[in-house]
């Protein structure tokens, strides 16, 4: 561990961070290992053991401390104990692995008796429907601050945090590339809510077109930023696009169905263009500037291996 007095972060190499798993009392069973591989067969078990197990241990300690603090507050106020979910946010570029990280953490955190119910939410449900984006000329700005109904997103997280018994969110489909009408995601007072999306660390400054004074981060207990070199991000984006081309894009329902016919070379050109014109621009303008707001930063290298961990002091 490196201590730089001028940095707000403690810096860990992969090795020093992985040693912090030693005290994890719950080793992974065969069945759990299988389930983790089911999330994404590319995720190596060494990665889960060395990076995500220590992280889940840290989170378990923080959550227990927060639960104790909430009990004290209820006692002080003379109230019956009430349920408040612990909210974890995961930010980072498109294709850095936010949703995979979220699912690994969900699987690991569910194993603890203090918080067995872990819900996952993605912020894409709060994108405006394509019809609205088209009217506003924002179809090539999906993921940029102005493409989200940010007030609705903030209200959603606020409702979760205030202990509402049932909170709902719209659902976005990557297949149809749009909000799905008549579908909703439901959050019913789980112990933990993991909310992932490229905008979860953004503040009012990032939304000058729609000023608001309360941010998602006001309701988040622990924030994570997943980071990687931009060349790796582009490679991962293109690789995922190629995989979708031979999978989801072959579905006639898919918005990108016509891309299924492309040769591999053409598909790489299309993916590189979408990356460069939309996701890379968004990364530079709106996502990277929020990195230092995170409580924890995971810096990935090749093959998605986490090389460094930064934890706020
Ligand atoms: N830890 C990991 N190990 C191996 N591959 C990963 C890992 N995390 C993500 N990936 C791969 O990287 C790509 C992007 O991951 P994804 O979780 O969909 O990113 P995001 O939600 O940030 O857009 C996917 O193809 C996924 O399979
Ligand atoms: C849906 C997204 C904006 C990500 O949304 P998030 O869940 O991070 O809020 C992104 O995956 C996306 O589709 N971007 C538009 C350009 C593209 O097709 O990659």
Image (cartoon, rainbow, N blue to C red):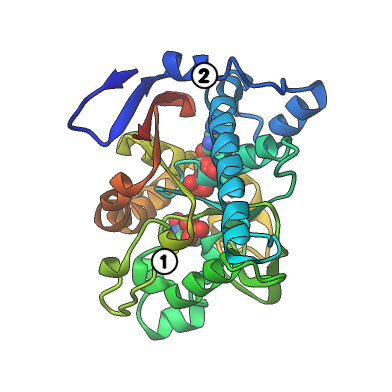
Q: Residue at x 72, y 20 (%)?
A: 27
Mark 2, secondary structure of its residue: loop
Q: Residues within 10 Å of mark 1 (few under 14, many from 20)?
A: some
Instruction: State the residue in front, 163 or 238.
Output: 163
Residue 177 seen in the figure: no
Mark 1, secondary structure of its residue: loop
Label 1 or label 2, whichever comes before in sequence order? 2
Instruction: State the residue in front, 73 or 268.
Output: 73
Q: Which mark is residue 20?
A: 2
The CA distance from mark 1 to mark 2 is 39 Å
Q: Position of residue 240 (x, y in %)?
A: 52, 43
- In the shown orientation, is residue 58 left or right of residue 302? right
Q: Position of residue 97 (x, y in %)?
A: 50, 41
Q: Which mark is residue 126?
A: none
Q: Is residue 229 above or below residue 44?
A: below
Q: Which mark is residue 142?
A: 1
């Amino acid at each position: 561990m490196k201590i730089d007095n001028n940095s707000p972060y403690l810096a860990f190499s992969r090795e020093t961070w992985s040693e912090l798993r030693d005290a994890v009392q719950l080793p992974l069973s065969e069945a759990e290992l299988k389930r983790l591989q089911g999330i994404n067969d590319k995720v190596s078990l060494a990665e889960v053991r060395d990076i995500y197990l220590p992280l889940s241990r840290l989170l378990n300690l923080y959550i227990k401390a927060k639960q104790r603090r909430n009990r004290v507050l209820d006692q002080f106020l003379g109230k019956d104990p009430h349920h408040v979910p612990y909210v974890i946010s995961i930010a980072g570029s498109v294709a850095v692995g936010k949703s995979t990280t979220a699912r690994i953490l969900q699987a690991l955190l569910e194993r603890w008796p203090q918080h067995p119910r872990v819900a996952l939410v993605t912020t894409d449900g709060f994108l405006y429907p394509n019809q609205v984006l088209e009217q506003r000329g924002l179809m090539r700005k999906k993921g940029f601050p102005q493409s989200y109904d940010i007030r609705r997103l903030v209200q959603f997280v606020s409702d979760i945090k205030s202990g509402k018994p049932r909170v709902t969110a719209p659902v976005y489909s990557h297949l149809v590339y749009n909000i799905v009408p008549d579908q909703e995601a439901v959050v019913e007072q789980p112990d933990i809510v993991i909310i992932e999306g490229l905008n979860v660390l953004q503040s009012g400054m990032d939304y000058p077109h729609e000023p608001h004074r309360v941010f998602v981060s006001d309701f988040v207990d622990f924030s994570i930023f997943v980071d990687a070199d931009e060349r790796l991000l582009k490679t991962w984006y293109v690789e995922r696009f190629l995989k979708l081309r031979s999978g989801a894009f072959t579905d006639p329902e898919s918005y990108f169905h016509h891309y299924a016919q492309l040769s591999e070379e053409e598909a790489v050109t299309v993916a590189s263009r979408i990356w460069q014109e939309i996701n890379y621009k968004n990364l530079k303008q709106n996502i990277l500037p929020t990195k230092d707001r995170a409580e924890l930063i995971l810096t990935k290298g090749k093959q998605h291996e986490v090389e460094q961990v930064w934890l706020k002091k």
